[in-house]
């Protein structure tokens, strides 16, 4: 896909976006673009693959009550997942996840859940780097995936991700806790029925009490998807499958 404003094919997976959202948000970064610094990062909503694979993602944690519950469900169903962590939450609640993340991936969701679209490039970089440092200090890992808070791609978001070597990861399906608060079976069916090969599912392990309608029924979603022939992967595993598929495409 060509990116009109900057002429760089950076967004292979940016379905439905004719124009890059570089000039959106409150702190447009388009003025710092030159041919030399045109971004080449990718934006992924889902991955093109024939394989029945799906990646579950959990944002905003960790938190003392819900993150262990999610980890228990993942353990019980032998499901790897990706946690897009808020650095500040990880620094406060490192004990909650220590020793429990081996099979899971950790992505960057900024230090303070800042809306990067409202920040200038330096502050966006700071938010991302401070979180990455915390993730590294606690887990020994270096995150390669960035999920911008609120899914906002405006302002400096894409430039900051590109500068720091991140792939931007959004989602193709999400829990609908407000809609299904009183109807967990509908929430389960919604996910089980709507997942497609290469889907990325968004859930949250922090926040409003209604989110429990999803978190308490993860096992039913996993079992329903297994019955449909799905297997579970981390986002990086999914991206690797997508890259293979792209390489095989004529
Ligand atoms: Zn978030």
Image: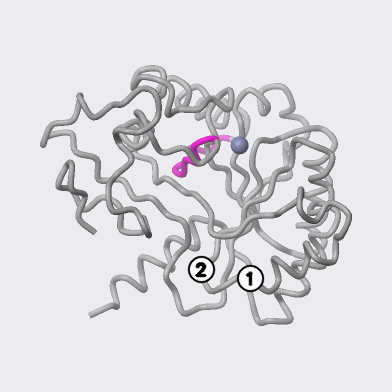
Q: Which residues are magenta?
A: 140-149
Q: What's the CA distance linking mark 1 and mark 2?
A: 12 Å
| Residue at the right extreme of this rendering | 182
Residue 198 got which mark? 2
Helix, strand or loop status at disc 2? loop
Q: Nearer the viewer, residue 218 or 143?
A: 218
- Horizontal and vertical percent position of residue 29: 28, 26
> Looking at the rendering, in which quadrant would you find the C terminus?
bottom left
Quickly name the residue at label 1.
194
| Residue at the front extreme of this rendering | 179
Q: Residues within 10 Å of mark 1 (few under 14, many from 20)?
A: few
- Horizontal and vertical percent position of residue 150: 55, 37
Q: Nearer the viewer, residue 34 or 226?
A: 34
Residue drawn at x 59%, y 66% is 54
- Quarter of the displayed picture in which ligand 1 can be seen: top right
Residue drawn at x 28%, y 78% is 249
Helix, strand or loop status at disc 1? helix
The question of residue 67 being in magenta is answered with: no
> Looking at the rendering, in which quadrant would you find the N terminus?
bottom left
Q: How many marks?
A: 2
* Image position of 59 (left or right of 177): left
Hey, which quadrant is residue 135 in on the image?
Answer: top right
* Image position of 61 (left or right of 72): left
Q: Is residue 191 above or below residue 87?
A: below
Q: Nearer the viewer, residue 174 or 67?
A: 174
Residue drawn at x 70%, y 44% is 204
- Horizontal and vertical percent position of residue 164: 34, 33
Residue drawn at x 81%, y 43% is 68
Q: Is residue 93 above or below residue 242?
A: above
**CB under 8 Å between discs 1 and 2:** no
Between disc 1 and disc 2, the foreground one is 1
Main SS category, magenta section: loop
């Amino acid at each position: 896909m060509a990116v009109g404003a900057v002429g760089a094919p950076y967004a292979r997976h940016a379905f439905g976006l004719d124009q890059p959202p570089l000039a959106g948000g409150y702190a447009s970064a388009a003025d710092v673009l030159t041919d030399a610094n045109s971004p080449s990062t990718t934006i992924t909503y889902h991955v093109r693959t024939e394989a029945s694979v799906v990646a579950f993602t959990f944002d905003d944690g960790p938190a003392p009550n819900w993150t262990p519950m999610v980890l228990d469900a993942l353990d019980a169903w032998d499901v790897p997942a990706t946690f897009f962590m808020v650095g500040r939450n990880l620094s406060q609640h490192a004990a909650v996840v220590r020793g429990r993340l081996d099979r899971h991936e950790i992505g960057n969701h900024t230090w303070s859940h800042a809306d990067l679209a409202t920040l200038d490039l330096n502050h966006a970089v700071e938010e991302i780097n401070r979180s990455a440092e915390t993730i590294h200090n606690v887990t020994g890992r270096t995150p390669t995936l960035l999920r911008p808070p609120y899914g906002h791609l405006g302002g400096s978001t894409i430039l900051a991700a590109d500068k720091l070597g991140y792939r931007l990861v959004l989602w193709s399906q999400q829990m609908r806790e407000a809609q299904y608060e009183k109807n967990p079976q509908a929430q389960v069916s919604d996910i089980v029925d709507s997942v497609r090969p290469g889907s990325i599912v968004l859930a949250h392990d922090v926040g409003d009490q209604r989110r429990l309608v999803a978190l308490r029924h993860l096992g039913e979603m996993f079992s329903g998807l297994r019955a449909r022939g799905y297997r579970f992967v981390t986002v990086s595993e999914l991206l690797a499958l997508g890259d293979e598929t792209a390489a095989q495409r004529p």
